[in-house]
Each structure stands twice: as C-alpha cells, then as structure tokens.
Amino acid sequence: MAVAAATIRLRTRRGYDAHDITAEVQAAVADSGLVRGIVTVFVPGATGAVTTVEFEPGLMEDLEALFERLAPEGAPYHHDARWHDGNGHAHVRASLLGPSLTVPFEGGRLELGTWQQIVFLDFDPPARERELRVKILGE
Ligand code: ZN
C-alpha cells in the first residue's frame, strides 16, 4: 500500500460559500498513480465542512436555506458572547457536517454516483484562503 498527498487551494467569498471540488480530488487521485484505494479530503479549520451533494443551483440554495433555518446568522450564540468573533453560526453549521469525507476509488476513478459531487462548504463570514488536505491510500 502507498500513500500520496495533495493540497486543494480555494479562495472563498464573504459569507456562505460552496465549491464543487470533485475535479480537483479526481485529479489528485490520477496524479498519485494509484489504481484502487480511498481518498480523504480534510479541511483544517472549524468553520468549513466537506460533504457530497448534487451540485446544482436549486439544491445549493436549498442547502443554504437549511443552514439558515438550523443555525441562523445573527441569532445569539454563546460563542459570540464569549469571543466576539461573530461566527458562532459558522462553527455550529460546520460541526454538523464534519471536516472530512472519504471516497473509494477503483481503476483510478472516484466511485461517486452520477449526481454526487464532492463539495466544500465555507461558513466563516470573511472571505479567506483555504487549503484542503488530500490523502490517498491505495495500491
Ligand atoms: Zn469563532
């Protein structure tokens, strides 16, 4: 078994942001030269998350609306009262999804469903740079 690594760099916009990173993850697997195994994508940071969803505009709006219902921006959060950084909603949203996703691959191809994309969600209010860690284990 071998291990390969890659980094996916993203620039996020202010407020809620979503990026389809399927092509970048597939490219990392292809570059590794590994044929079968698993790939993990991880965001270092407590206000981002990685999940799968069909990346189409309607569903992306639905998802954003869901997070606004579950953990509205501007609602009172103990985190904001304590730290005054105004991102309590971002932390709560991120912890619901988690910071990583593992996808199997075979024949050098991600074994995703046809309408299943790998999506990075950024909940932190300011625009920022993100560096997602990709680790590939396989043969
Ligand atoms: Zn915070």
Image (tube, rainbow, N blue to C red):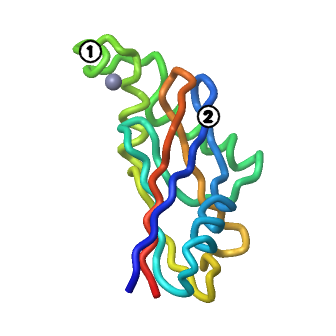
Residue 102 visible, this angle: no
Q: Say if disc 1 is inside 8 Å of ligand 1.
A: yes
Q: Element type at marker 2?
A: strand
Vertical arrangement, residue 26 with respect to residue 55, above or below: below
Q: Residue furthest left?
A: 82
- Position of 8 relative to 128 (above/below): below
Quarter of the image where one finds residue 27? bottom right
At 38% from the left and 86% from the top, the residue drawn is 1
In this view, 138 is above or below 130: below
Circle on res. 83: 1
Q: Which mark is residue 11?
A: 2
Q: Under 8 Å from ligand 1: the CB of mark 2? A: no
Query: Quick check: 26 left or right of 80?
Result: right
Dot 2 crowding, Cα within 10 Å, few <14, some 14–19, many 20+: few
Q: Residue at x 43, y 47 (%)?
A: 43
Marks 2 and 1, how far apart in space? 25 Å
- Counting from the top left corner in percent of width and height, residue 8 is at 56, 50
Residue 66 x, y percent position in the rendering: 56, 40
Question: What's the residue type where badge 1 is placed?
Answer: Trp
Q: Quadrant of residue 102?
A: bottom left
Snapshot quadrant of residue 94: top left
For label 1, count other residues whose C-alpha is less than 10 Å away and answer few (under 14), some (14-19) or many (20+). Answer: few
Closer-to-camera residue (49/73)? 49
Q: Nearer the viewer, residue 46 or 32?
A: 32
